[in-house]
Image (cartoon, coloured by chain):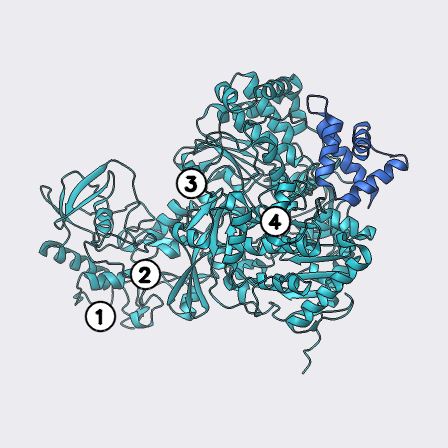
Chain colours: A blue, B cyan
Amino acid sequence: MDTGRLVRMANQIATFFASQPGGRGAEETAAHLRAFWDPRMREALFAHLDAGGEGLSPLAREAAERLRHPA
Amino acid sequence: MKDFVIPGQTGAPAFSDRDHGTPARAGAPVTLTIDGFPVTVPEGTSVLRAAALAGIGIPKLCATESLEAWGSCRLCLVEIEGRRGTPASCTTPVAEGMVVRTQTDTLRRLRRGVMELYISDHPLDCLTCAANGDCELQDMAGAVGLRDVRYEAPPEAPLANHFLRAHAGAPNPDWRPVDDSNPYFAYDPSKCIVCSRCVRACEEVQGTFALTIEGRGFASRVSAGTAADDFLHSDCVSCGACVQACPTATLTEKSVIAIGTPERKVVTTCAYCGVGCSFEAELRGDQVVRMTPWKHGKANRGHSCVKGRFAWGYATHPDRILSPMIREAIDQPWRQVSWDEAIGFAAARLRAIQAEHGPRSIGGITSSRCTNEETYLVQKMIRSVFGNNNTDTCARVCHSPTGYGLKQTFGTSAGTQDFDSVEQADVVIVMGANPTDGHPVFASRLKRRLRQGARLIVIDPRRIDLVRTPHVEAAHHLALRPGTNVAVVTAMAHVIVTEGLANEAFLRERCDWDEYLAYAEFVSDPRHSPEATEALTGVPASELRAAARLYATGGNGAIYYGLGVTEHSQGSTTVMGIANLAMLTGNIGRPGVGVNPLRGQNNVQGSCDMGSFPHELPGYRHVSDPAARAIFESVWGTPIDPEPGLRIPNMLDAAIAGTFKGIYIQGEDILQSDPDTRHVAAGLAAMDCVIVQDLFLNETANYAHVFLPGCTFLEKDGTFTNAERRINRVRKVMQPLSGLADWEVTMRLANAMGAGWTYTHPSQIMDEIAATTPSFAGVSYERLEELGSVQWPCNEAAPEGTPIMHVEGFVRGKGRLIVTEYVPTDERTGPRFPLLLTTGRILSQYNVGAQTRRTANTVWHMEDVLEIHPHDAEVRGIKEGDWVRLASRSGETSLRATLTDRVAPGVVYTTFHHPVTQANVVTTDFSDWATNCPEYKVTAVQVSLSNGPSDWQRDYAAQAEAARRILPAAE
């Protein structure tokens, strides 16, 4: 998967949830990725995290990490 | 046609064809006596209608129930006890105790005299007339007992009639030739009786006001504008309401002239836009003679547009591919094969791909043009036979943000109203939609309400027709800069909240109050004020404030929106913002209000309902929900993957990445319709098995290995669900030209992959849908026969369906107001690409044009053109009609320019109906944050003069031509 695209999509999602009150942005972003992204898209995102996660916004990165290692 | 019935037999069938002469009225019951029969009707009803309801047909010519009474033909005269003279029954309202006689010697004499005068100026060529047997003038001559016409032209000159071409050796100055400029109907002035039904239909039903009666007395004639205008070049939009209203052969469908009058009718549903008009397909044998809007159709109430009524010729177009075809590779010509060979080839390839690349390496796209039953089967095949959730549908590229946004706010993703609701709206917001072109029959219903005094707010970058059209003028047009929808909607909420216009009682009762408080704090921030956002949106603050106040305080407020809302990187956020406005003002849960997405395709609502999305099973239940999966697993007998699948753009990305290798595409042309054509082409080219099922060799088929012939809506049974959640029946009027209906093709493919399905009729598929999907629990073909149509949810709680949603409470419980922060799109203008391109549709063409380009509708729109503001054109040296190059960072194309101030400086606009233009070469891969719905409506572009088609267009045409080669069939 084109990681540039995935990074942009993850950042867009994180931007929306960052704007929501309640401070649950990372959790909501992770839930959105879980609900709407096919497993290979999530895997590609995790692989990108392993490679340094360049371009991911802090919230998107936090969401991706949370998704990868659910509490 | 005669529609007399025997008096006393008032128990007319539920869907009677009878014309009652004047429209129905609602009112207190009034009882009168007609020819001795007591009749009780609502107050305000005409005597003519009351008689018809009692089964007594009073002769009439200028009256028809789709139009208000006019009182000009003097044929429907009656005698009323205690009243002088012989009043016209069409213009006389009933009164309590009234005693009416419809047939007396006086009336008989008067009517015969009237008819004699009509006939004296009408050609008596009935036997060779196209309306023979379907002519109200003929019927009335019979009904009044006309036996003789005493008025004959004197043998010597000047004569006064309209129908003789010449008389006494001299041309008749009052004769006019037939105007056959319109491709679908002819106007023969010599047969006109000047009843004004056509003119009134154009005004009252369609709302275009293209027709008038010019001249007076004997010189009166129907005219489409000035003397220089013929029908084609007038304001006429060819909706056909005039043709339907005409009681004679003056306005006649050319198909009737060519074929003859129809001998049978089948009620069915239009396969064009999401309005979902009901039609009677009128036939001789299996040949369609004409399509007539069905007056009992609840979406259209007897009206239609040019596409539904006239543009059905594609169904028998020679371009139809009727034989299955296969090829090893896309650079080879097609080979025509049997169904068995094609299906076997496809099944083997798909299974081979899965064996090599895993179960999730294939998928499919359901069609928003096919029936619910067919869509359900395709997603069922993907889920239970392919064994994954890689299913998507074209709603991905249109209304997927509606699904997400309304589900988050209200709890379900559908429009809240029926179309009848607009009749009770007081303030209507039309946002990012162009109903007169995209949803014409709804537009006519809206315009009727606007003429009655409802106010209109248009939010659109372009000055759509509704902004100012005969007898309609928007109170406010917020001509925002493309891409700033969220800022505008949030600013409207700012005004409503900060000026104390919010409906606090509604919010406290129906919404989550704490969420409202957080939301109110957010929107009240001065940075969301119209003054603060004006520089960004381009909408004058005072205008926005006035619009917000009008919506909040003007009575019933209804919002209708289209793809100008959804096809943005913040499409879902805007949908939430719209829902917020409705909740803030309490405009939800009753007639006349609501949030109404205008759906693009005939069955885009249904395809979403039927589980076409990769994360949702039918009925919008997430695939991760074990309880939902269990229902389908038990009925289907196969496990369901709990992981969401790929969406269309993700499928293409995965194809390029090498993990997605096979796709079954039913009735969708993603190469033309989806953004960034080069990316789509690369994705398709990377697959090992592309199966296209369609009517024609569409653009996507250039990259296909298997072509399975599809069939039109005329060739199969099923249901479509329109934008108001209305499930309408589609009925087969002819056998599938390829031998198989689309659902049968899917079943064959599934069975070739081991499914073992045994459906023999689509009604069985609907029964399975009803058994598994709670909102469809009460739906069956029997129920649809009984009710005509039904709006889901249809279940035990609502056995006759649900016209208005969220009446008592929201589907999700409490309505949820969601913070809508404006985030500018990444697609920015700059020195290289300084203009913003936005796209839309035109009345005569439909989406990628596969159907309408194969009809005479092309006379109105031969090619896509670029609308550009004269200022922008001037600085580029562009003149009207010049060939221009349109370039973005994705690609470039070329087309002709037209100069207009409909678009603001800095904005250009085009349609996407023609593959030679390929507007989507230019659109980008940016998409809605929540749903990946492409950002079609905002592309930064440059426009410059050009010499003709671009290199890309030439290469594309060459590739398409090579890809469409078909080997001659083997002997």
Q: CA distance from mark 3 to mark 1?
A: 58 Å
On what subunit does the disc labeled 3 rest? B
Q: Nearer the viewer, residue B771 or B527?
A: B771
Q: Earlier in the sequence, mark 3 or mark 2?
A: 2
Label 1, on which residue?
B156
Q: Residue at x 78, y 48 (%)?
A: B653
Q: CA distance from mark 4 to mark 3?
A: 35 Å
At mark 2, the secondary structure is loop
Label 2, on which residue?
B248
Kindly indicate whether the residues beneath marks 4 and 1 are on one polypeptide chain: yes
| Amino acid under disc 2 | Thr
Label 3, on which residue?
B420
| Residue A69 in sight from this viewpoint | yes
| Amino acid under disc 4 | Phe
At mark 4, the secondary structure is helix
Q: Earlier in the sequence, mark 3 or mark 1?
A: 1
Q: Nearer the viewer, residue B914 or B808?
A: B808
Kindly indicate whether the residues beneath marks 3 and 1 are on one polypeptide chain: yes
Label 4, on which residue?
B632
Q: Earlier in the sequence, mark 4 or mark 3?
A: 3
Report if the CB atoms under discs 2 and 1 are less than 8 Å apart: no
| Amino acid under disc 1 | Glu
Kindly indicate whether the residues beneath marks 2 and 4 are on one polypeptide chain: yes
Q: Earlier in the sequence, mark 2 or mark 4?
A: 2
